[in-house]
Amino acid sequence: MKESKNQHSTKVSWEALTYFNFYHFLISFLFVSLFWIGQLPEPLGEYDSQLFGITAHIYLFISIAAQLLVRLKSPPYVLQVGTSVFIDIIIITIMMYASAGLNSGFGMLLVIAVAGGSLLSSGKTGILYAAVTTIMVLGHEAYMHLQQIGVTPNYTHAGFLGITFFATAIISHALAKRVEVSEALAEERADDLEKLAILNEHIVQRLQSGIVVLDDSFSVVLVNESARQLLGIDADSTFSTLSEISAELDLRAREWLELTGRHSTIIKLGNENLDIQASFTRIKLERKFEVLIFLEDMSTIRQRAQHLKLASLGRLTASIAHEIRNPLGAISHAGQLLFESESISDENRRLTTIISDQSKRVNNIIENVMSISRREKATPTVVKLDEFLEKFSQELRTRHQLQADDVQIIVKTTNIYVNMDPSQLHQVLWNLSENGIRYSKNSPLLVIYCDIVKATQRPYIDIIDCGSGMEKNVEEQLFEPFFTTSAGGSGLGLYIARELCEANQATLNLHSNTESGCCFRIYFSHHEKQHTII
């Protein structure tokens, strides 16, 4: 940062010296041109026109050489400035002598030389230039007086001109200091702005929300890391327009801009069934505008809503537990007493069996609902899926007394790591696997497939059964609580499984439903650990 500031300051100084030397070139070129066409106005060259012409040619040659040295930046800047000013003072003094003294008006050119040198030099060097110039002017007048060349010396004019030189040097030095202070302040402000811009960029890139910035022609200005993960964009990929990233997102943004679409909408990305909430905002600039798009993973939003829902459900179940379980226990106990009575008929004994079974079912429903409200907050840990699935399949075969070929585990990508509560992951897989085994008709009864989505690097698990699929109306209500197609089911299994996934920033959905079976897919949040392809 500091080096760039010094480089900038040096560049400005060399440019200023270039303009100063160009001024010398213009003046000398004008004098040479007037000399050759014989149109030198009085009193230029009045006393010695030949000396004036030679000096003008030397002045032109030196100004051209000075410009070349500035381009080469050698010798150093300070030496070039000092040499240029001193040569300027000497040559103008000689031309003033050739033009019959101070009355020629060359004193003003000396004022410009002193002012230029003071502005281009650091410290109080300008005072030295003023002193040297004053000595040269007074020396010129003394020489003319001693030589008695016919021109009356004007010491008063020379004295006032010397005062002008010093005043010019002092004022130029003050202006130069003010310019330096202003430039230092501007550089400091630029440094602060640059740091602030870097900080803002770092914050934007690290935000959990995805951010896409578009200009007024819908060209992509910025896409942060979260947006790249949500949209499945590689870190090295570049895009010029929004349609190249997502045609649907581009369509929704244009509809919103034309006031025919919503400010906030939900889009589904490809075949991943990943729901993303897109919110659009317009940023007004001077003569144009930019569009700011916020992208949120719906699983995160659902997780926040779930905490509120579970809090309400907890208060509800706490009140109904006391109101229902006590009467239910009395009904169940009464039915058991009737069943054990010796005077009851076989037909009534069958009715008491129905009372007992249904009481147990109601009690099971209450237990499931209360388990949701009592469930502790998810504590995700890093889980290696291939090892976890191997242990899970062994437990599943043992519990249901299955053959090795009845449950197949296919891990397409090894070393997949996910963030999820292991006990809750086990509960979700157990529920889905038992449903798959229950409805499967062919071998294998269950296939558990594990891989990652290459575009987004999101791991997933497929639980595939070999049943006959499900009807459309069943599919539409699949994850609703208390909906079941089993006579003894509570209708809370898939609902709880989805809730557990959302509590861990994962998503559970029905990936496919065909006549040869169903596939439930669990999408996990992106994890930074390395995946190894088999």
Image (tube, rainbow, N blue to C red):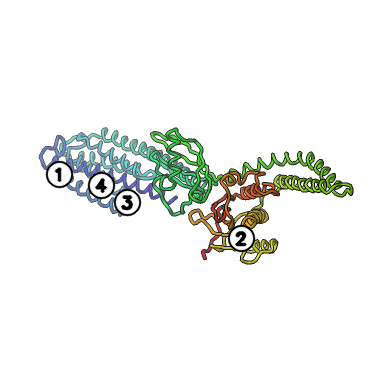
Q: Residue at x 17, y 38 (%)?
A: 99
Q: Amino acid at mark 4?
A: Ile
Q: Identify the mark at residue 79; answer none if there is no mark.
A: 3
User: Where residue 448 appears, x then y in whole percent?
Assistant: 59, 59
Q: Identify the mark at residue 263; answer none if there is no mark.
A: none
Cα–Cα span, label 2 and label 4: 101 Å
Query: Which numbered disc flags the more N-terminal residue, 2 or 3?
Result: 3
Q: Element at badge 3?
A: helix
Find residue 412 and report its image quarter.
bottom right
Cα–Cα span, label 2 and label 3: 91 Å
User: Viewer-nearest of labels 2 and 3?
Assistant: 2
- Return the residue nearer the eye: 526 or 299: 299
- Return the residue nearer the eye: 335 or 523: 335
Q: Residues within 10 Å of mark 1 (few under 14, many from 20)?
A: many
Q: Amino acid at mark 2?
A: Leu
Q: Which residue is mark 2?
A: 445
Cα–Cα span, label 2 and label 1: 110 Å
Q: Residues within 10 Å of mark 4 (few under 14, many from 20)?
A: some
User: Where residue 319 appears, x then y in whole percent?
Assistant: 76, 38
Q: Identify the mark at residue 87; answer none if there is no mark.
A: 4
Q: Residues within 10 Å of mark 2 (few under 14, many from 20)?
A: many
